[in-house]
Image: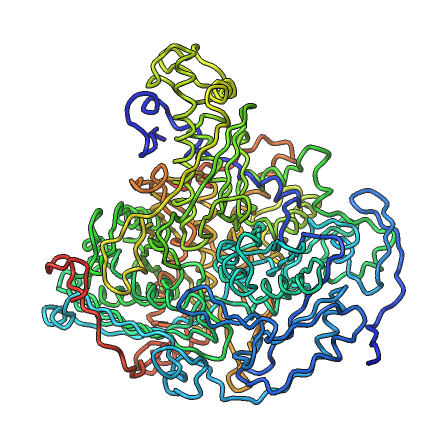
Amino acid sequence: MASRKAKSSANAQITLVVNGEPTEVAFAPHKTLLEVLREELGLTGTKHGCELGECGTCTVLLDGTPVLSCLVLALACAGRHVETVEGMAGGPMLHPLQQTFADLGAAQCGYCTPGFLLAAQALIEENPKPTRDEIKQALAGNLCRCTGYLKIYEAVELAAARMRGEEAEPAPESIHGHD
Amino acid sequence: MTTTVPKSLPTEGRAGEQPLRIVGTPQRKVDAVAKVTGRTVFADDVQLPRMLHAKLLRSTVPHGRIVSLDTSKAESLEGVKAVLTGKDLPIPFGILPVSQDEHALAPDTARFVGDPVAAVAAITEEIATAALDLIDVAYEELPAIGSAEHAVATPTPRIHDYGPEGNLHKLVDLEFGDVEQGFAEADLVREDLFFYEGNTHLPMEQHAAVADWSGDKLTLWSSTQTPHYVHRALTKVLELPASHIRVIACPNGGGFGGKSDPFNHEIVAAKLSMVTGRPVKICLTREEVFYCHRGRHPTLMWVKTGVTEDGAIKGMHFKTLLDGGAYGSYGVASTYYTGALQTVTYHVERYRFQGARTFTNKAPCGPKRGHGTPQPRYALEIHLDKLAEELDTDPAELRLHHLVPPDSVTANYLKVGSMGLGQCIRKVTEGAEWKDKFRKLPHGRGVGLACSSYLSGAGLPIYWNNMPHSGVQLKCDRGGGVTVFCGSTDIGQGSDSILAYIVAEVLGVEVGDVSVVTADTDLTPVDLGSYSSRVTLMSGNAALQAAERAREIIAPHAAQKLDVPESRLAFAENRVFDVEEPDTGMSFAEAVQLAEGAEGTIGTVGSYTPPRSPGRYRGAGVGPSPAYSYSAAIAEVEVDPDSGIVRVPTIWIAHDIGRSINPVTVMGQVEGGVYMGLGEALMEEMAYREKRGLVHKIPSMLEYKSPTTLEMCDVVTYLIEDPDPLGPFGAKEVGQGPLLPVMPAVANAVYDAVGVRVDEVPITPEKVLKALKLKAKGEEPRYGPTSFPDIRWPEPTRVPPPWEGGDGKAV
């Protein structure tokens, strides 16, 4: 029987800046940024929950703005800055958001966490003192099935306060419940 | 916080002097940093050299005989390495020994849209997907069954050739005392009908697995909550010795019960790896996750209760009809669970339960958070709200007056230990200012109360054996580190951390000194899995035992060297020292070295088997637990009478946790449970297009509505700490219980707000509006089912309750 051939095309090659480092990568031109990050660059910290732009799990920052990496063609990222969860920590020091997410249990299964962290980072960079409602609005495109979002809000508020230089601590009732 | 010693430790001497250092104190989870830095390796993150990618071809018809299946074109596609069909995997499997009704690939009949019929492995995912289009399948379509009522009315064609008759999968009829006599003695008898729509887990992580056959040994990485059961299923279907299969459960990106069955894709990936000699990965699409399902059974319920003037329950008769979908899954257990826990909250003098599970041509239902108990709890708590109104009694008072006493046995022979529901009710009513709000808020606003209980692990394993439910091995390194090995699986709830906290507490080291190796059938002793809220209690007790044994080995050597009686030794702050003269001591590492020098390598084991339940009748295996958690919730709602939209600003919830081992993770489970309950109450539904070939109506995250940040309510949480003697340090479950009271609390609040009863979840605007229209017309202001079909029930199993001289056996 004659062998059939699946559709294929020549690889595209671009340079983009990933977590501050210029990175050259070759890939099939139909690949999404999500696929290139995970499969070509081995940056599996970026997760996927639907690959249809519905859940926010694959959120990364493209030139500082949160995007759904499953909906962005990697080809469109040539020369642009991509920030993933792997680049959040400054060397061995966790980002304040990573600290508070870890301390408050804002990461349960941790699967949606990278997307939430990056969406929250973009929010705080634009608005250093977000209200609870502003946090809800900014994170409304990210689904989490574990936490009910409450510990995420508290972690964002606490990190934002610390990034403003305040000596903030979590409220006792958010750790132990109400008396 | 007061300091208390672990229950299993001696209350005098060294341990009696030691305050708890870690248990009860907020801690980071042991995997928290990995999770916030993207380092956690989930199943789809596993990459192996030469790895192939697999895809499944799924049935496009809800019920059909496979007339022909031609894979030749797919096989000849360049890049395709193997194609499998049902004949390649002929041995059936299933999670329960009584329901071995699944095949990895349907051999002759497809039973729902989404049932896998063929599989491809190729060098890329794209080629594998393209190859699926080249497989020709012809089906002879069979009549499809779309609901439980339809199944009861349609005995042929049978979806499976087992079960009591027709399309009934399981029938249960249990009677604990003469309920008719109970109704005769009652002052008020009421009947109600309820329907609980199915819904699904929707874990953020799509199921994935990677299989690697090395020539004589298979390794499978999978997003599974139950590696032990996957191990057993692979052994059976692949006909390999268990010793030649290694299953590694990766951290699950959310489970909620949806990753508790052995799945087609896991077996297919394994077989494809064996056929090709290369590693094979399969990652399901989000649409396929909906087909895996195993979520909440759509359940029709009828309940009749007789009460005295003061609300004492003289008799209760409960009937359930479950839509099981296309396969057995955990369904027999689910059926029993729809009748098991009605008795553990309020004293029920006589109780009868009749449950039926049907097969239908839809994705199989199974265990979702709360497994079989949210449905009857919804019914029971609304039913009680209605009874309280008829009795002109405050529903909180009604409940408080008839609580099951601690340390008692229920009508159906469930042994209740600690019981903190009364404290839970008092906390939420006080916090929510219940007395000022109930029946007093302006039209459109309301409050509702509901309570619940859940297991801290099932009393029996899912396959009969007399071995422990959880095992731990523990190794003390001469450098002072401790490693815990346990088969338990972290699905985000923090079970890995619990092992570290408990071991660190007992051995006096820091949490960071404990390494945890879990969920690997080659490396770790069996733990049955992350289901039935069993892990903290069972693996926690196993870890506690292993750590105590290690201390018993180490202590004599330290005591001898320090020349103090062993009874005066304390293990804390990485030291072993004299409690009376704390300066006399040594580091933990030195103590280990002394012991190792004298006795050789220091390793211990611990294991846990639940106590035997007093029930001795057929069916008594579902419901018993070492300890029951309790919850009470009050929901406040705003109902727009024009649109029917229900908003929930706040839920107050109190949960009887026994003891919080780590309050941070407990709070997270409570809030997450409330969230998931809110979704079930208001919007989540697994719906099908009945007139369009029973295709799933909404297999996407956009259309399957779940609460976002904009819908989630505020939660005011109270943790009730009433230590249970059987829990490690007194701990009970929290993973499932706090979901249960949310749905009925919301329903009762909607009634308080606008005076209509929505006896069906989800409580959508359409249902509220329909009920409001009936109210406006002066008809019964209610939306819900109106009849329960006739079912040919078997002769009931009659078991007199303990207070009628029963001994737990059927008569």
Position in image of residue B48 (x %, y %): 72, 52
Q: Is residue B791 left or right of residue B82?
A: left
Q: Residue at x 41, y 11 (%)?
A: B562
* Above-or-below relation of B339 to B139: above
Count of numbered labels shown in the rendering = 0
Residue B35 coordinates in the image, percent (x, y) = 61, 44
Question: Residue B185: in sight, yes or no?
Answer: yes
Q: Quadrant of the C terminus of chain B?
A: bottom left
Is residue B752 at least partly visible in the picture? no
Residue B78, image x and y in percent? 81, 71
Say which of B88 and B227 sits in front: B88
Q: Nearer the viewer, residue B426 or B512?
A: B512
- Snapshot colouring: rainbow
Apparent side of residue B514 relative to residue A173 in the rendered image (left or right): right
Q: Kindly indicate the quadrant of the structure image that contains residue B736.
A: bottom left
Q: Is residue B8 left or right of residue B764?
A: left
- Dividing the picture into quarters, in which one does residue B478 lie? top right
Between B29 and B483, which is closer to the camera in this rendering? B483
Q: Splitting the image into 4 quarters, where does residue B1 fall?
A: top left
